[in-house]
Image (cartoon, helix red, strand yellow):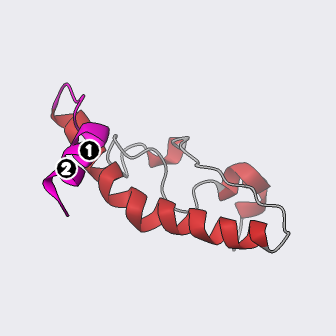
Amino acid sequence: ITSEVLDKIYKEYIGNAKNRAEVRDGLLDAIADPLFVLSAIEVARYHRDAGNPVYFYEFQHRPSQATGVVPEFVKADHTDEIAFVFGKPFLAGDV
């Protein structure tokens, strides 16, 4: 990676940070975007190019049951959207 590319990455993710928490959040985004977002976009494009409808979303709503369990800076974890999409009653009992 060239210094020009690193400078652009820094400016995009951390350059406007006002405190340590914003630096942390920017660094986490800088790591997650190439690992998760870019690959998800690539798969979505394959489906689109095959003629299928594609819906892409980013779930960020912090569930109330996360309080005291995960750090406050975590918006939503993997699969947290299931209760919101399908409804909490479907998750009751022996699921």
**Residue 79, placed above or below residue 30:** below
Q: Quadrant of the N terminus?
A: bottom left
Asked whether residue 75 appears in the rendered view, the answer is: yes
Asked whether residue 92 appears in the rendered view, the answer is: no
Give how far across and how far down residue 78 sits, in percent.
52, 62
Per the rendered image, the range of residues in magenta is 1-19
Examine the structure image and report whether residue 63 is included in the region drawn in magenta.
no
Left or right of 37 on screen, residue 24: left
| Residue type, numbered disc 2 | Glu
The residue at which mark 1 appears reads as: 8
Label 1 near label 2: C-beta < 8 Å? yes
Give how far across and how far down residue 29 sits, in percent.
35, 50
| Residue type, numbered disc 1 | Lys
Give how far across and how far down residue 91 sits, in percent.
71, 62
Q: CA distance from mark 2 to mark 1?
A: 6 Å
**Residue 84, placed above or below residue 50:** above
Give the foreground label among 2 and 1. Answer: 2
In the orientation shown, which residue stands out farthest toward the top? 18
Q: Secondary structure at mark 2?
A: helix
Residue in the picture at 58% in, 48% down: 59
The residue at which mark 2 appears reads as: 4
